Each structure stands twice: as C-alpha cells, then as structure tokens.
Amino acid sequence: MPPASRATGVNNAGQVTGEATLPPDSGADVAHAFRYGGDTGMVDLGTLGEQAASSFGNAMNSAGQVAGGSWIFVQNETSDIHAFVQSGSEAMLEIAGNQGPGIVVGAAINDADQVTGTFATRDFTLPYLYTPATGAVLLSEPAWEFASGAGHGLNAKGQVVGMVAHYAFLYSGNAFTNWALMLGGLALLGAAMRRRPASSLLGGNFGPPMSAWWLRSGSSARPAFSTSNA
C-alpha cells in the first residue's frame, strides 16, 4: 500500500507542498513535509533536527520555498511544533523561537520570505509575522492578550489577514483593521434591508460600504521572541 499523503499548497509554477508518510521500509511511522515538482518528483524536506518526529508543509511561494511546522520530541513524547522555512536543497530553518511547550506553525509565505501563522503557548494563541531581516513579532493589541487567534494569509506587501477573538483582521503598515463591529454592521444592514420594499432588494445601491462599520485602531505589533536569524 503506497504511503498516505495530502497536498496543502501550490505555486504558479505548479510546485506542490504538503505532507506524506514515509515508506514502510523506512522503519518510521511518521510523515514528512515534501515539495513536488514536475522535474523533481516528490522531495522529502526532512525535519528540524534529529529530535524531530515529523513535519508538514502548509504553503509555498513562487520560488518554491515552503513554510510549515515540525514536531519536536521531548523526553520521547511529542510536545512542540516549531515553524520552519525550507529553501531549495537547504536544511529547514526555524523561524520563530518556540521555547516550549507550545505550537508555532507557518501558514503562509510570500516572495519576500515573510511568514505568518500561529504562535501558541499555555497563556495565549496569537498571529505572528516573521521577516528575515527583523525576526518575528506577535500581532496583537492589548485587548487580545488572552484571546485566541492566528494568521492565515499574507500578500506581497506583507499584509496579514487572520482571526483573533472570533473576528477577522487585516494587519497592514504596523496597524490593524479589525472587524469587532462587523456583526453590528451586519445587523444595521439587515435592519435597513428589512425597511426597504422587496423590489428594491433586487439591485441598486445598498448604502455605504461595509468598511464604514469596521473598527480601526493604530496599535503596533510588539516584539515577541528571538529567532534564529534575528
């Protein structure tokens, strides 16, 4: 029976990343992150060091660099996940210093090698942004200190989208646009639509854009932790 696998990311060149269980003859019942290309086939990306149990790729940029996570064994028990970036034939690079116990995962990567994802400890779970030149910072506001959230997407400008405390957010230029009032905005829209004749709901101007009801704040991201190349 062939090894099980799943694909989680693809770039415009048709390269694919994900995770695949090792062949039965490897003697290890674990999965490794991979990169697949038409000219290379499936390439095992390995793990973060000898103590790593398994790894998985989540996202890939146009250069074929992969972001994901690697499990680390502590005293023969699976304990932590550490985020990584893997480039070409190089070994995985840990990009956010997980002092453990905790989970740090790379969920998205852009062509500037910036990565976002989840940084979780016993005390909080928040999104982060990693930049090669400056290391990683937690993306949080004071009210989010005990909230739960994650970074899910990242564009070429380094803008991050995700969720914190059950609300979507956009992080751009060291400031947040978050949707804490979005439900209130939807309620206002629903009330306005209920007051309009049914015929008017089939088209036309529905009033101000939803962004008029979004809450914006200018809180900056704060340094979170040291990284291997900060």
Image (cartoon, rainbow, N blue to C red):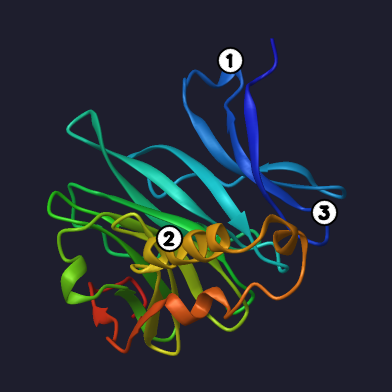
Q: Residue beneath label 3, please?
A: 14
Q: Closer to us: mark 2 or mark 1?
A: 2
**Left or right: where 199 falls relative to 73:** right
Q: Earlier in the sequence, mark 2 or mark 1?
A: 1
Q: Earlier in the sequence, mark 3 or mark 1?
A: 3
- SS label for mark 2: helix
Q: Residue beneath label 2, please?
A: 187
Residue occupying image coordinates x 40% and y 56%: 83
Amino acid under disc 2: Ala
Residue occupying image coordinates x 40% and y 73%: 129
Q: Are marks 3 and 2 in contact (CB under 8 Å)?
A: no
Q: Disc 3 and disc 1: Cα gap in Å?
A: 28 Å
* Place of residue 204 in the rendered image (x, y in percent of width and height, measured from the top left): 76, 72
| Quarter of the figure that contains the N terminus | top right
Looking at the image, which is closer to me, 152 or 147?
Answer: 147
Amino acid under disc 1: Pro
Amino acid under disc 3: Gly
* Place of residue 38 in the rendered image (x, y in percent of width and height, measured from the top left): 86, 47
Residue 203 found in image quarter: bottom right
Q: Can you say whether 82 is above or below 55 in the image?
A: below
Q: Can you say whether 121 is above or below 174 in the image?
A: above
Q: Residue beneath label 1, please?
A: 24
Q: Can you say whether 118 is above or below 75 in the image?
A: below
Looking at the image, which is closer to me, 224 or 203?
Answer: 203
Q: Which mark is residue 106?
A: none
Q: Residues within 10 Å of mark 2 (few under 14, many from 20)?
A: few
- Work out whether residue 143 can be spotted: yes
Q: Closer to us: mark 3 or mark 1?
A: 3
